[in-house]
Image (tube, grey):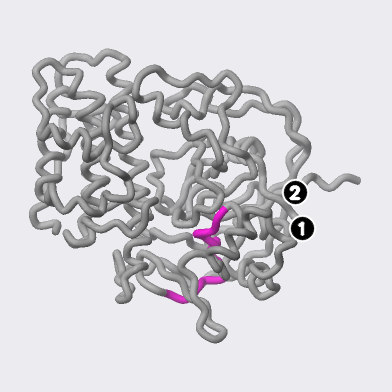
């Protein structure tokens, strides 16, 4: 596929932190994620929650055309039909092609979508090299860049689910990143709590759901030194974790029974050997790597089994706010959670990267939250119902996309994302 793929790099005269350079860099990164795939791979949709790669490539382009270029005098659409085909959930923009049917779009062809990207990219770069942009327009372009980084992560998670459905169990890439790591002894880190500030502090970009910054009172609490591992999870399985209704929320147990869950998504067991499907193909479970592809229901049941609980999102953010945003992100190329190689003695490890960590916090507006006017107001606010917050990013998240205040969210049964769990508990009192 990559032979006819067009790449658009920023001119060397543009400084790295300009919108022009960042736009070009992110757009090129998305194409690189598609490069290992066949045209057939890019057209398929394995479930309603996932989308074909071809659709992701078109939708991220649609975002720039719809919210940026359509505001420019004299703009002519590449194809007026794309306004419907690549609209995701923006009802105020107009009609949408049904989400579960995106895999039926054999036309436009993959080459047509690449041509669409090239058309929009050329006009975006012309705009960005022109006169200074109004602050509102520059903010929308920044939103489009961040939006595309979200879809880069979705491309990887959607492709993983797609390839897992193929009986050939094909690999997205064949470079396996894991090496043997000595097991780490878990420990607890204590936090005094009190009145703390959470939410975005106004420095740099943030989505609307990260604001306003506000005060939250935290009781003293403790956070586990690292995420729950595959080895820990095997202990839960072998102690009957998926067969004991007393460990589960009622809706969770109903889901376990209905879906016949016996292990995290992608796991299989052959005699005493556990394996999992990865973007590198099917491999043996690494007992020391963070467990992933678990739902909120599973995370909550495991915490109850372990005599602990899930952290609140405020507890997580309070603990992570002074920790450098480093870790196993998309840029490492591992594309799978890995065991830590360096012991951290003064702070919890792997708060960022590897796996999104479920919290016990419902996804709801912060005090004082206001939905933005216009279509972009549909970006986050209307999903504040029946979802739970995850924090910290994953091995599929671009590192430059992450910050302590970032709030991801999914329904409690979702498992196809790189989601894991870190335990918390109330502070031990003398």
Quadrant position of residue 183: bottom right
Q: Are marks 2 and 1 in contact (CB under 8 Å)?
A: yes
Q: Closest to the observer: 345 or 7?
A: 7
Q: Residue furthest right?
A: 430
Work out whether 36 lies above or below 404: below
Query: Compared to 214, does 258 lie above or below?
Result: below
Screen quadrant of the N terminus: bottom left
Q: Earlier in the sequence, mark 2 or mark 1?
A: 1
Q: Which residue bears the numbered disc 2? A: 425
- Residue 218 shown left or right of residue 5 in the figure: right
| Residue ID at (49%, 71%) | 267
Residue 213, percent from left and from top: 57, 23
Which residue is pictured at 36% across the width and 71% down the height?
281
In the rendered image of this protein, does residue 370 appear above or below residue 250?
A: above
Secondary structure mainly formed by the magenta segment: loop
Residue 16, image x and y in percent? 26, 32
- Mark 1 Cα within 10 Å, few/some/many (few <14, many 20+)? few
Residues in magenta, as a range: 283-295
Q: Which mark is drawn over residue 307?
A: 1
Mark 2 is surrounded, within 10 Å at the Cα level, by few (under 14), some (14 to 19) or many (20 or more) other residues, namely some
């Amino acid at each position: 596929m990559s032979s006819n793929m067009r790449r658009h790099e920023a001119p060397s005269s543009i400084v790295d932190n300009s919108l022009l350079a960042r736009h070009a860099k992110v757009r090129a990164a998305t194409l690189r994620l598609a490069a290992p795939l066949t045209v057939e791979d890019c057209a398929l949709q394995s479930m309603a929650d996932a989308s074909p790669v071809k659709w992701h490539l078109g939708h991220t382009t649609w975002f720039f055309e719809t919210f940026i270029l359509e505001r420019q005098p004299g703009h002519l659409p590449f194809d007026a039909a794309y306004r419907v085909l690549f609209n995701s959930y923006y009802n105020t923009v107009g009609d949408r092609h049904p989400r579960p049917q995106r895999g039926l779009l054999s036309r436009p062809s993959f080459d047509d979508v690449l041509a669409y990207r090239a058309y929009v990219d050329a006009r975006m770069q012309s705009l960005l090299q022109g006169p200074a942009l109004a602050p509102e327009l520059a903010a929308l372009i920044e939103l489009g860049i961040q939006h595309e980084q979200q879809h880069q992560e979705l491309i990887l998670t959607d492709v993983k689910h797609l390839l897992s459905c193929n009986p050939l169990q094909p690999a997205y890439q064949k470079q396996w990143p894991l090496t043997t790591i000595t097991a780490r002894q878990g420990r607890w880190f204590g936090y005094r709590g009190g009145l703390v500030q959470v939410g975005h502090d106004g420095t740099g970009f943030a989505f609307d759901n990260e604001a306003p910054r506000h005060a939250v009172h935290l009781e003293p609490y403790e956070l586990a030194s690292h995420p729950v591992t595959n080895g820990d999870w095997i202990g839960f399985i072998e102690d009957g974790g998926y067969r004991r209704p007393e460990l589960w929320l009622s809706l969770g147990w109903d889901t376990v029974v209905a879906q016949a869950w016996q292990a995290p998504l992608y796991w299989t067991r052959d005699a005493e050997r556990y394996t999992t499907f990865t973007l590198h193909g099917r491999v043996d479970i690494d007992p020391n790597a963070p467990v992933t592809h678990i739902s909120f229901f599973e995370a909550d049941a495991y915490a109850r089994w372990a005599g602990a609980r899930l952290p609140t999102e405020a507890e997580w953010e309070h603990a992570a706010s002074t920790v450098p945003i480093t870790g196993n992100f998309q840029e490492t190329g591992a594309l799978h959670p890995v065991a830590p190689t360096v012991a951290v003695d003064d702070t919890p490890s792997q708060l960022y990267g590897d796996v999104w960590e479920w919290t016990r916090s419902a996804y709801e507006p912060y005090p004082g939250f206001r939905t933005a006017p216009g279509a972009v107001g549909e970006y986050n606010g209307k999903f504040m119902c029946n979802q739970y917050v995850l924090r910290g990013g994953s091995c599929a998240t671009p590192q430059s996309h992450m910050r302590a205040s970032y709030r991801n969210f999914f329904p409690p049964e979702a498992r196809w994302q790189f989601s894991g769990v870190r335990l918390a508990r109330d502070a031990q009192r003398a």
